[in-house]
Image (cartoon, rainbow, N blue to C red):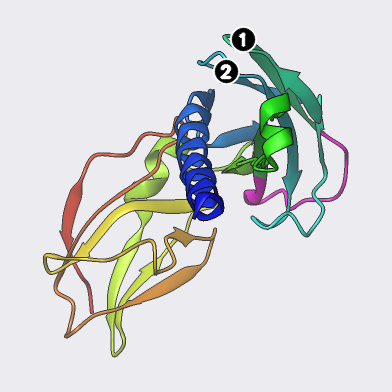
Amino acid sequence: MKRMAGLLAGMLALIMTCSAIAEDNGGVSFSRNRIIFPASERAVSLTVTNHGDSVYLVQAGVSGEPDRRTKAPFIVTPPLFRLEGQAENTLRIMSSGGSLPRDRESVFYFTGLVIPSVQQPTAAAVDSKLSATLSVSMRSVMKLFWRPSGLKPAPEKAPDELRFSRTPQGLRVTNPTPYYQSFAELSIDGEDINLDQAPSMVAPFGDITFTAKGPAHSVTWRVMNDYGGTTLVKTQAVTQ
C-alpha cells in the first residue's frame, strides 16, 4: 500500500510539473507571428523573449514544410542558444542563395523549438527511487514569405483583388495576385468555415474551393496582413 501511495504521489507530481512547465513555457515569445523577407534585403531579424525566470534552450531554423523535413534556402543565426530568465535574444534569418520565382511570393516555415531546463532530482528522491525527469518543449511555427521586388499591386491592395465564384461544390476563391492570401475568417451565407480543418491560404495565381451546403450567395471574410493583424471584415456577393 505504501508503495502504491508513493507511485500515485509521483504521478501527481509529474502532472503538476507538466502543467507548471507548460504554463511557464508560455512566457517565451517571438516578436512576430509571420515573417516577410523582401528579396532586396540580406537578412531579417526577430526577437525571442523569456518573460519568466526559468532557463530555456532555443533551437531555430527554416524549412520548406511545417514538419521541417525539407530544406529551405535560409540560414538562422544563432541556430541554437541558451536563453536565460528575463532575457531576450535576436535571431537573424539570412538567404543562402538559390533560385526562387521572381514573379510571385514563395512560402517557407520558421520553427522555434523552446526546451525547458530540467532540474536534477534531490538525493532524497534518488534514494526513494521515485525520481523522474520530465521535459515539455514548445514548438512555434510561423510562415516566412520571400517577396521579390516590384510586385504589383501593392501588398495592402492585394486582398481587394480576391474573387469569389459559385461552383457545384460550393465556393471557389481565386487569387489573381502574386501574394499568398491567408484567411483569418471566412463565412458563406452566414455559416462560418472552420479554417483549422480546411485550407486557409490561397497561393499566388491559384484558387481553392470550399464546400457549402447549397449555392453560395454571399461571403464574409478577412485575411492576414503583413504585420500579423487582419484586414477589415468585408462582405460581398458571390458571382456565377
Residue 41 can be seen in this image? no
* Magenta segment includes 131: no
Q: Secondary structure at mark 1?
A: loop
Q: Quadrant of residue 81?
A: top right
Give, as a three-letter code, the residue at label 1. Ala
Residue receiving disc 2: 49
**Spatial separation of the CA atoms under disc 2 and disc 1:** 6 Å
Indicate the position of residue 236 as horizontal and vertical percent values.
Answer: 17, 59
In the rendered image, the residue lying farthest to the right is 97
Rendered position, 166 above or below 218:
below
Rendered position, 190 above or below 40:
below
* Magenta segment includes 108: yes
Q: Secondary structure at mark 2?
A: strand
Residue receiving disc 1: 87
Instruction: Magenta stretch: give its range.
Output: 95-109
Indicate the position of residue 194 as horizontal and vertical percent values.
Answer: 30, 65
Mark number displayed over residue 98: none
Looking at the image, which is closer to me, 218 or 210? Answer: 210
Residue visible at 41% across and 38% down in the picture? 225
